[in-house]
Amino acid sequence: MADARGAVPGLEVRALHAGYPGRPVVQDIDLTLPAGQVAAIVGPNGSGKSTLLRAIARLHRPESGTVHADGADIWSLGRRQAAHRVALLPQSPRAPEAVTVAGLVRYGRHPHQGLLRQWSREDEQAVRDALEATGTTDLAAERLDRLSGGQRQRCWLAMVLAQHTPVVLLDEPTSALDLGHAVDVLELVREVAATGRTVVMVQHDLAAAARYADTVIAMKNGRVIAQGVPRDTVDEALVKELYALDADILQAPGDASPVVVPRARRTDARPASALPSPSPAASAPASLTSAPSAATE
């Protein structure tokens, strides 16, 4: 559905309800996200973030509601046609054993293959472009399982880019990465959006979401409780509502993006005095109090 200026949103979700028999997970979701921007979904565990991504990607059928990607109703398309419009990188994806980086990225072209269309120069160029965009060209011949976590994540992103979809969904793309590799991935996400794609990522780091996303979407108990520009959306009240955490919100130098600084324990945290004390060393088994083993020398 076009907006007042006639532009078609990159992603539009209307009145979406999804879940499992007897257990609703996401309820009454409405989103309109433009092309060329990054949206970050934040919220506590179990709030429905991953289920929402799967419903958008046509992997989990909603009970009601619609999803339009680049103007097309995803659930009215076949699976292969839908994969021309939406790509999803799940959390902790698994690759075939001993696959090379180039082999992995070629999987991104699978939706474009068929009985009447085999591997082509266009596919090969898409793979080369994706490797170049993610800085993984030099890794093309390497086995994925021999790379560092940050390198592997860039390779998975290359596979998603090779799929050539206008909408890209990323479920916790910086999970288990150290700070340096996480920043590399988030900057790459910004570059992906700059090509005109709509990028939606689940992000547990609220400060990272505020810094790298154009829109923050806050979810709790399966519902969107806030959404908007980070500096207008991320505040003390939102942090308290989402995480039961008291915090101060500062402004980052340069772009003035919100920075969350916790200033109190969770309201349901146990006091330190309630934690058990360590057992006296004298009561430990002799093997634990003897000289270090060879493995630690």
Image (cartoon, grey):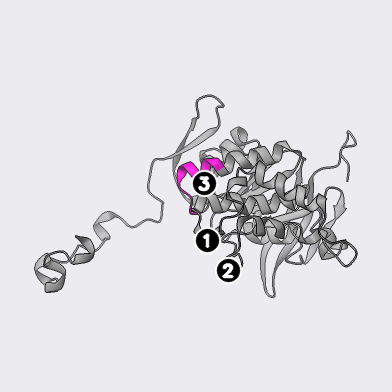
* Number of the label disc, if any, that sits on residue 145: 1
Question: Which residue does the image show at 30% across and 55% down from the upper left?
Answer: 271
Rounded to the nearest whole Å, what is the CA distance between mark 1 and mark 3?
26 Å
- Give the total of numbered labels: 3
Q: Nearer the viewer, residue 264 or 62?
A: 62
Q: Is 273 situated above or below 195? A: below
Depth check, front residue: 153 or 215: 153
| Residue numbers of the magenta segment | 176-184
| CB-based contact (under 8 Å), mark 1 and mark 3 | no
Residue 182 in magenta stretch? yes
Query: Label 2 belongs to which residue?
Result: 97
Q: Is residue 254 above or below residue 282?
A: above
Q: CA distance from mark 2 to mark 1?
A: 8 Å
Circles 2 and 1: CB atoms closer than 8 Å: yes
Q: In the image, is 3 to the left or to the right of 268?
A: right
The residue at which mark 3 appears reads as 205
Q: Is residue 265 above or below residue 119?
A: above
- Quarter that holds the C terminus: bottom left
Compute the Cα span from label 2 to label 3.
31 Å
Query: In the image, residue 155 lies at what x, y percent?
Result: 61, 52
Which of the two labelled residues, at mark 2 and mark 3, occupies the earlier sequence position?
A: 2
Q: For the residue labelled by badge 1, is the local secondary structure a helix, a strand or a loop?
A: helix
Q: In percent of the image, x 61 and y 67: which residue is there?
A: 96
Q: Left or right: where does residue 196 sit relative to residue 73?
A: left
Q: Give the number of the mark in front: 1 or 3.
A: 1
* Amino acid at pointer 2: Glu
Residue 255 falls inside the magenta stretch: no
Q: In the rendering, which numbered label is found on residue 33?
A: none
